[in-house]
Structure formats: C-alpha cells, structure tokens
Image: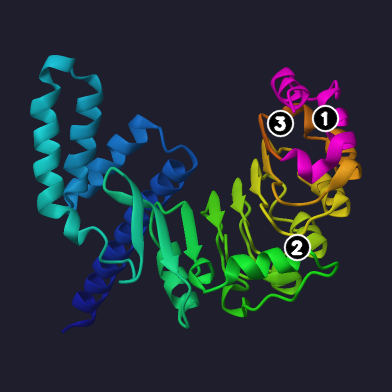
Amino acid sequence: MSEGLTARFARRLDTSVIIRTFVRMQATAVEDALRARPDDLASWRTYSDRLLEQGDARGTLIRLEQRLARTRPADRPAVEREIADLVAEHEGGWDDGLPATATVLARRHGFATEVTVPWSDDVRDVVEQVLRGRFVTTLRVTATMAEDEGWEEEWEEEDQETEVRPGRLDVGPLAGLDAGRLTELDLSYLDLGPDGAETLATSLRADRLRTLELRYCRIGDAGLAAFAASPYLGGLRSLHLQRNRVSAEGVRSLHRFPELTELDLRYNRIGEAGAEALVAAPFAGSLKRLWLYDSDVGQGGVRKLAHAANLSPGLRSLWRCV
C-alpha cells in the first residue's frame, strides 16, 4: 500500500473512531440525564431512538409505554397487549449483564432499576456487576440472619446488655465500592456491628443516596456516628435504624442529616433524652414520618414529642394519643 493510501486509510480510521466515541458520549450523557430525571419523557424518547438503531426492543417498549399513557381508557387494552407480547418475547435477554444470583424487583421501560442480591463469598464481584447496570438505582443486599435458628432469642438477650456486640460479618468486600448511581441502599439484617458500619461509612461512595435501610445491623451509637460523619450521606431523606442499640447519643449524631423526612428508630431505647434530641434536630420540622414506640422514649419522651411545636401537627397529635 502506498504512503498516500496508508495516510488516507489512517484518516478514515481516525474519523470512524472519533464518530463512535462521540456517539458513545452522547448516549452516556442521555443516560446520566435519565438517571437524574427518570420522568423526563423527551429524554426517554431520544434514548429510544438509539435503542432502535441498535435493534434493542426496549426502544419499542418505551414508545409503546409512552403511547399507553396518552391512550383513552377504551383503547388501552390493545396497547397493553402489544406491550405484554413484546415483554414476553424479549425480557429474558434484558438481564444478561446481571449476575445469576441477582433478582430484579422493579423495572422502568424494561431496564432493571431495583435489584436484590444475597450475601455470598463473591458478593463484591456480584455487587460491582449490578452497579454497572445502566439504570439500577436501588440495591438490596440480603442476609440469612433472619433464618438462623434462635436469632430472635439472641436479640432479646442482647437487648439486656449494656455493650453492643461486635458484628459477625466481614464487610471488607463492600468497602470502597462506587455506588454513585444509587439512590436507595438496603443492608438490613447484615450483621455489620460498629466496626463494619465505620468501614462502610468511611469508604462507600454514594453521594446520590437518599434512602438508607440499616434495620437489625447492630451498629450502635458508634456505627451511627460513623455514617453521620460520611461526606457522601448528607443528602439522606429516609433512614431506617430499627433495633440497632441506638441511644440518645446516637440520636444527637443524626443532626448531621439535615434533610431527613423519614426516620425509623423503633426498638431503640433512646429515652427522654433521645426524644429531646429529636425535637432539637435540624430536620424535626421537616419530618413527615417518624417510627417510634412509647417504650422507646418513656412517658417523659412521649410528652416532649406531643408538645414539640416544631414537629408537624400530625406527628404531635399521634403522640398525644399514646
């Protein structure tokens, strides 16, 4: 091949690479926009064009589901049948990128958005694979603790102790994961303990996280303080801490979550001091849902919550009935 032909071929190759790179960048930009604004119909329609060019049936699904939203009730059954037929034919191949142990709990336009995986020896590889899903925003990692014989008796016994037991789970495999796409993370029943909580809190990158579920994780005040100190979790809106041996000290660390609107503190003996710390929290006036039992705060705590002027009228009236 002459030098001239070689040069022209190289230029064409460079141009082809540039075009492919540009197209990929455009697709990535649209996907980023859709993760940030999942209800943006125009962006989904733009994305459907690209999917159709690739022969991905989800492009057609997007069009059909958007059409369904505009269809009169009398004409909806026909469109719904089209959607059902398309899903039945193609859904089996839509999760090829997910690990075999993953279970899809929710989808949007055929794409997995909510996924659960069991704890296992290869949990890091499994979770990393799930997090590569284009639109996965909710991840649940499940444990077998609730299936262990005698676990309820063990919790009742531990409730009588003054110290929080160390966690039994090595959370090292989850340390340092980039969970920047997640808006909801559920680690309930994983036996983290205070040290495990600190390991995750200081390494997990999840700055878009809005819901964190840590029920029955044994994190205690120290573990909760570690999560509260994380630079990535300041935007949390919903936090579930059922039965974690949290006291009034732990409630005070919650003040570092100024945007909370939902808080579950059931089965944590925070006492009257904990109720006082709740009332003084910067998010108290924004709370829409608060899960607590009267036994968690005592009669003095009930009175403080019932008469806290900065709590919503609905929450105050609830405590006045206790």
Gap in angstroms between the C-alphas marked 1 and 3 = 12 Å
Where residue 108 sits: x, y (%)?
Answer: 33, 43
- Determine if the magenta segment contains residue 301: yes
Is residue 21 something one can see in this rendering? yes
Where residue 281 sits: x, y (%)?
Answer: 84, 37
Judged by depth in the image, the label closer to the viewer, 1 or 3, is 1
Image point (23%, 33%), residue name: 65
How many numbered discs sit on the rendered protein? 3
Secondary structure at badge 2 equals: helix
- Residue behind mark 2: 159
Image point (40%, 57%), residue name: 115
On screen, residue 147 above or below 307: below
Is residue 258 something one can see in this rendering? no
Q: Given contact means CB atoms under 8 Å apart, are the residues at marks 2 and 3 in contact?
A: no
Image point (76%, 27%), residue name: 319
Amino acid on which disc 3 is placed: Leu
Callout 2 environment at 10 Å: few (<14), some (14 to 19), or many (20+)?
some
Classify residue 37 as left or right of residue 207.
Answer: left
Residue 118 picture quarter: bottom left
Secondary structure at badge 1 equals: helix
- Residue 287: image tag: 3
Classify residue 151 as left or right of residue 72.
Answer: right
On screen, residue 300 above or below 105: above
Mark closer to the chain start, 2 or 3: 2
Residue 273 picture quarter: top right
Amino acid on which disc 1 is placed: Leu
Where residue 152 sits: x, y (%)?
Answer: 60, 65
On screen, residue 165 above or below 205: below
Please report the bounds of the magenta region as a residue range: 293-322
- Residue behind mark 1: 305
Secondary structure at badge 3 equals: loop
Where residue 62 sits: x, y (%)?
Answer: 24, 38
